[in-house]
Each structure stands twice: as C-alpha cells, then as structure tokens.
Image (cartoon, rainbow, N blue to C red):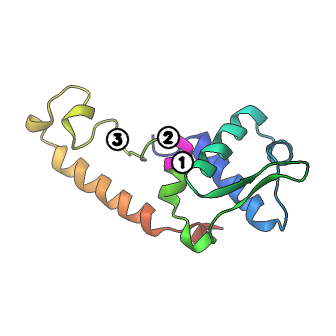
Amino acid sequence: MLLTRASEYALLSLDVIRKSDNPIGAEQLAGELSIPKSFLAKILQSLAKQGILESRKGAHGGFLLAKDVTEISVNDIIFAAEGKAPAVFDCTQYIATCPNGAIGSCSISPFLSNFQTKIDDFLNGLMLSDIL
C-alpha cells in the first residue's frame, strides 16, 4: 500500500505546523486533528529524526518545520512516516522482496519496476509546498 494513515497524519500535521509561528506539541496536534496522541507522537518523532521537523523541549516546546516547505519532498515525508520507501506493489524489482522469489521469471517484473520508478520520481519531485 502506498499511503497509510501514518502518511496521512504526517501530512495533516505538517499542514498545521507550517501555519504556526510557535512550536506545537503532540498533544495539541492530536486534539486538533482528532488523532490518537501516542500514534501521532511516534510519527512526529520520525519526522524529526529524518530532519523534516525540529523538536523543541520545555514548557513552550513542540515541533516546528526544520526546512522550508519547498525543500521537503512528499517521498521524504512518506519514508519518515512509514519507516520505508513507498511501494505501489508488494513485489519489486529486487529478489529479496519478491514474495515468491521468482523475479527472474516474472513476466510483469519489468512493468512493475518501471511503474515504481515513475512513482518514485513523481513523489521525489512533489514538494510539500505543492500540496498545501
């Protein structure tokens, strides 16, 4: 699956965070977006770990964008939220991830690989500023 709730919540959170002049905490975001706080906190930490968000501690702490919205690709957001590169299909061009180990004899493997490459290129070229 290309996008899960984690990606959706990441994008929604980034939209709220980009509009704020002050850091926003996970609890405030969770309440505003009606998202379970524990799930959202993990997503926000992943976004911070990947350099998309900046995490500030303290009484007035929370999250801020670490980069301009024109510098954050949707692919990077999905990777941070999901913990892996977005994949359209369960199988890929790699033998290790082919569910039946038949990548060499799979007649649709070239198509799947080409399609995934096009999706990757699209998501790498699509910036947060393009969708918000």
The local secondary structure at tag 3 comes to: loop
The N terminus lies in quadrant: top left
- Drawn side of residue 128 relative to residue 83, left or right: right
Alpha-carbon span between mark 3 and mark 2: 16 Å
Q: Amino acid at mark 1?
A: Ala
The label number, if any, that marks residue 89 in the structure image: 3
Viewer-closest of 108 and 81: 81
Q: CA distance from mark 3 to mark 1?
A: 19 Å
Q: Earlier in the sequence, mark 3 or mark 2?
A: 2
Q: Could you tell me the amino acid type at mark 2?
A: Gly
Most extreme residue toward the front is: 58
Residue to which mark 1 is pinned: 80
Tell me which secondary structure the magenta stretch mostly adopts. helix
Q: Is residue 27 shown above or below 97?
A: below
The one nearer the camera, 50 or 96, is 50
Q: Residue at x 34, y 35 (%)?
A: 90
- Reading the image, the residue beneath label 2 is 83
Q: Residues within 10 Å of mark 2 (few under 14, many from 20)?
A: few
| Horizontal and vertical percent position of residue 132 | 66, 68
Viewer-proximal residue among 79 and 57: 57
Please indicate whether residue 102 sits to the left or right of residue 38 in the image.
left
- Which numbered disc, 3 or 1, marks the residue that appears first in the sequence? 1
State the residue at coordinates (57%, 45%). 81
Residue 94 location (% of width, % of height): 22, 40
Circle 1 — which element? helix
Instruction: Give the percent coordinates (x, y) of residue 50.
Output: 55, 52
Residues rendered magenta in the picture: 79-83
